[in-house]
């Protein structure tokens, strides 16, 4: 569709731009995960009890899709019924680069099974069992590998930072130091590495609860 010209420039509206995404920053996560071989290393500590002959989405791909989705701000699994067609997410969450063009990703129902425990859930539908302690050890390994040599000691920098709220958002409170309503997460750093983020919550009477990590 052609509109009125803008000087010497033609103004056109077209709908043949192909697939587009608003989450291109996920490509940086893809590069980092590939450098660390992150998805395969995480998958080693998740027991997959699915029938291999009926598997359409590999465990590494499911982990990549879910974790990158959360990193991009899509915490709700239902979001993936639409995100499964996002071209950027298909690139970042497809670990087998030899299979040609990235195919459609898993939907919400498949990803939902990833977060249900095989041991405690219904084994007809819940097919994954995470070895939590070993997965936590992997986080330590990745941290140590970031150094040329394992450090003899580390120094933790623990501090809260305000995130200003817009209106009376749930979980936000007025802070006298910052003089505005805000969220007040607690960050734990070691040098440039962000190790943990917690949420400082309050009881109705204003007393602070313990941080939730």
Image: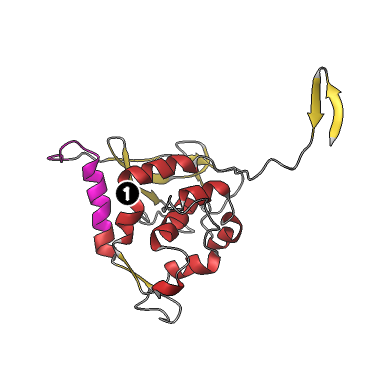
Is residue 145 magenta-colored? yes
Q: Position of residue 211 (x, y in %)?
A: 36, 54
Which quadrant of the rendered structure holds the C terminus?
bottom left
- The residue carrying mark 1 is 37
The quarter of the displayed image where residue 41 is located: bottom left
> In the shown orientation, is residue 84 left or right of residue 199?
right
How many numbered badges does the structure rendering display?
1
> In the shown orientation, is residue 134 left or right of residue 92?
left
Q: Relative to 193, does residue 84 appear above or below in the rendering?
A: below
Q: Position of residue 159 (x, y in %)?
A: 34, 40
Q: Residues within 10 Å of mark 1 (few under 14, many from 20)?
A: few
Please give the name of the residue rendered at 50% of the width and 68% of the height, measured from the top-left corner: 110
Q: Relative to 112, does residue 147 appear above or below in the rendering?
A: above
Please give the name of the residue rendered at 54% of the width and 59% of the height, measured from the top-left corner: 76
> In the shown orientation, is residue 143 left or right of residue 106?
left
Is residue 51 magenta-colored? no
Quick one: SS at disc 1? loop
Please give the name of the residue rendered at 44% of the width and 60% of the height, measured from the top-left corner: 62
Q: Relative to 197, does residue 109 appear above or below in the rendering?
A: below
Can residue 187 be seen here?
Answer: no
Which quadrant of the rendered structure holds the N terminus?
top right
Residue extending farthest to the right is 4
Q: Colour scheme in the image?
A: secondary structure
Of residues 142 and 44, the one drawn nearer to the viewer in this rendering: 44
Please give the name of the residue rendered at 61% of the width and 57% of the height, measured from the top-left corner: 82
Query: What range of the chain is rendered magenta?
Result: 136-153
> In the shown orientation, is residue 155 left or right of residue 205?
left
Can residue 9 be seen here?
Answer: yes
Q: Position of residue 2 (x, y in %)?
A: 85, 32
Of residues 8 and 69, the one drawn nearer to the viewer in this rendering: 8
Of residues 200 and 54, the one drawn nearer to the viewer in this rendering: 54
């Amino acid at each position: 569709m052609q509109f009125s010209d803008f000087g010497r420039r033609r103004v056109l509206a077209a709908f043949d731009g192909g697939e587009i995404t608003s989450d291109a920053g996920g490509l940086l996560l893809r590069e980092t995960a590939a450098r660390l071989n992150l998805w395969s290393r995480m998958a080693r500590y998740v027991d997959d009890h699915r029938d291999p002959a009926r598997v359409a989405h590999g465990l590494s791909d499911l982990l990549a899709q879910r974790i990158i989705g959360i990193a991009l701000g899509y915490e709700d699994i239902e979001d993936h019924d639409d995100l499964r067609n996002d071209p950027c997410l298909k690139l970042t969450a497809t670990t087998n680069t030899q299979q040609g063009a990235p195919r459609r990703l898993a939907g919400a129902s498949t990803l939902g099974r990833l977060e249900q425990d095989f041991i405690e859930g219904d084994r007809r539908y819940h097919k994954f069992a995470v070895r939590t302690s070993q997965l936590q050890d992997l986080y330590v390994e990745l941290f140590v590998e970031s150094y040329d040599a394992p450090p003899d000691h580390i120094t933790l920098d623990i501090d809260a930072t305000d995130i200003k709220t817009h209106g009376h958002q749930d979980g936000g409170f007025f802070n006298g130091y910052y003089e505005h309503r805000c969220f007040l997460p607690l960050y734990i750093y070691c040098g440039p590495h962000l190790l943990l983020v917690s949420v400082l919550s309050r009881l109705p009477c204003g007393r602070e609860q313990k941080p939730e990590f």
